Image (cartoon, coloured by chain):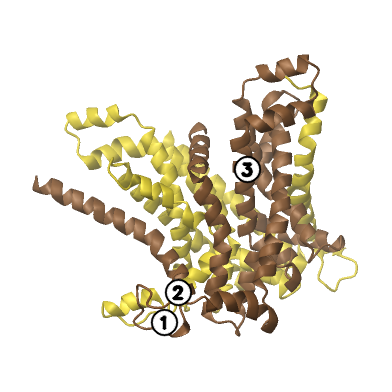
Amino acid sequence: MKTRVLSTALYYLLIVLLLLSILVPIYWLIMPSFLPPDEMFAFPPHLFPRAFTLKNYYDLIVTYPKTVTIDMPLYLRNSFFACGIASCIVLVISVLAGYALARSFFPGKGTLRTAVILTQMMPAVLFFIPIYLFMKRLGLVNNLLALILIYPGMVAPFSTLISEAYIANIPQEIEESALLDGAGVGTILFRIIFPLAAPMVVAILIYSFVWMWNDLVIALVLCHANEVRTASVGLFSFIGAATVEWGGLLAGTVLCILPPLLLFAFFQKFIIQGILAGSLKT
Amino acid sequence: MVLRKRTSWILVMPLFAFLALTFFYPMFYQFLLSFEEHTLYTAEPFFVGLRNYAIVLQDPLFFVALKNALLWTALSVAFQIILGLFAALLLNIPRRGYRVFRNLSLIPFVLPPVAIAVTWKWLYNPLYGLINYLVTLFGGEPVNFLGRNLALYSVSWVNIWKAFPFYALFILAGLQSIPQEIHEAARIDGATSFAIFRYITLPLIRPLLFVMALFATVWTFNYFDLIYSMTQGGPGHTTEILATLAYKTVFLKLRFDHAATLGVFMFLINFALSLAILTISRRVES
């Protein structure tokens, strides 16, 4: 009996430690971003806030763009724009390819699948030099279009495999009867596949968007000028800027983590199910 | 079956075009670049044979970065999987706590690496960081976590922190697919918990662990974003890995050719590491 009580206590102690190890760093980012400087740098630090201010956020959004040319609202807009468009491209190309892979046998299909899996194994950073030189020749360095062209290829291998697996599970009878009624491939895709695969569509959009939002290296290489920085590059340029206070930096970081955090909070159940289902299949 | 050959190819073309732009063409061009002289100031790149390879191999920084990259990869992958396994075993005990963990486990993994870097620089801060407060609370001297001696270990820890809950989620799914009857039968036969883990659970999830180790190794070895936004390879190249060195070779030294050669080396090392893990896994499993 005694050992059982002890082991239960040990279990909860370890679980609490585990949860704290994830949560405390994030708490220690968000909470101080609402503190005035004297509270922020208090030593010993106060574990719970004793004051509250929005000044860090005001500085970040209103003051910094005018004084130190660090324009976080602009960087966030750039990110939303480039990652939004590129995610839609990912959705289209990976559903088209996934549909073809799931619904037909054609020569080279196996090779194509292997190529897709291999590219998934190759990290983006390996190829940033040739990509940079290529974009330079096209005159697209420091242009958000460069990111819109490069990002989809980086994300699409994974989402193609997901969409192939998902579409393969949709029964074919509906499509066959639509074909008999004279529907073309375009009609089938937009009237049947997209509506039936709505959860997959959302998962692919979120996955791509968050991947692109989080990327640093490609954006740093292709878009480093002030007007075209993405949120990650903008935040990175902050870290080095001597004129910026910790308050503004923490506030900027909170704004950068909000989109991925909110997307996952809303769609999490189903993303976790998707990941685990996919992993168990392989 | 529904689709004709030609239609299938048309549907696959857009994906193929984007992959060509980001992978196939750059791979080919990178290889070409490594045999040319090509800097910002070269008007016409020309063939130089293996000269870039000789120059890169004579640079002591290459070996510093290689050693750091291997250490950073080994530390990160080993502890991501060990801690992940530990957390998964703990959560596999059917008690409360599982759901909370499952809902939180993805958070560090989906945050931007730059944001994680800021968060941990703030936590590691020698003057007002939380961790140094805890150190002084227990009577220690404040530690300079991002100084020369500790920087590589400190950034590796951040990388471990970021990914181990994610791996735990996968391992947990693997553990839950093991039929409960096997464990019960072993327990009736008098096996201890450790013996059950060692001789039943571990062999059953080992293939999953190897796959995870393979992916984690390739990702970590080239993982530029986190390490560069935390330390930019410093102080004094103590956290320089090949990826950060290649970046600096382009944007500080303006040597596209040397950087491309570094890229070829990274590609080969990735290949060798993957092959090594696959070989070990095949040995162990047979």
Of callouts 1 and 3, which one flags the residue occurring earlier in the amino acid sequence?
1
| Residue B170 appearing in the image | yes
Q: Chain of mark 1?
A: A
Secondary structure under tag 1 reads helix
Q: Chain of mark 2?
A: A
On screen, B196 above or below A69? above
* Nearer to me, A141 or B51: A141
Residue at the disc numbered 3: A204
On screen, B71 above or below A192? below
Q: Mark 2: which amino acid?
A: Pro
Q: Mark 1: which amino acid?
A: Glu
x then y, percent, for residue B223: 58, 59
Of callouts 1 and 2, which one flags the residue occurring earlier in the amino acid sequence?
2
Q: Chain A is shown in which shade?
A: brown
Secondary structure under tag 3 reads helix
Of callouts 3 and 2, which one flags the residue occurring earlier in the amino acid sequence?
2
x then y, percent, for residue A2: 9, 48
Q: Chain B is shown in which shade?
A: yellow
x then y, percent, for residue A94: 70, 39
x then y, percent, for residue B139: 26, 80
The answer to whether dots 3 and 2 both sit on one chain is yes
The answer to whether dots 1 and 2 both sit on one chain is yes
The answer to whether dots 1 and 3 both sit on one chain is yes
| Residue B34 appearing in the image | no
Q: Chain of mark 3?
A: A
Residue at the disc numbered 1: A39
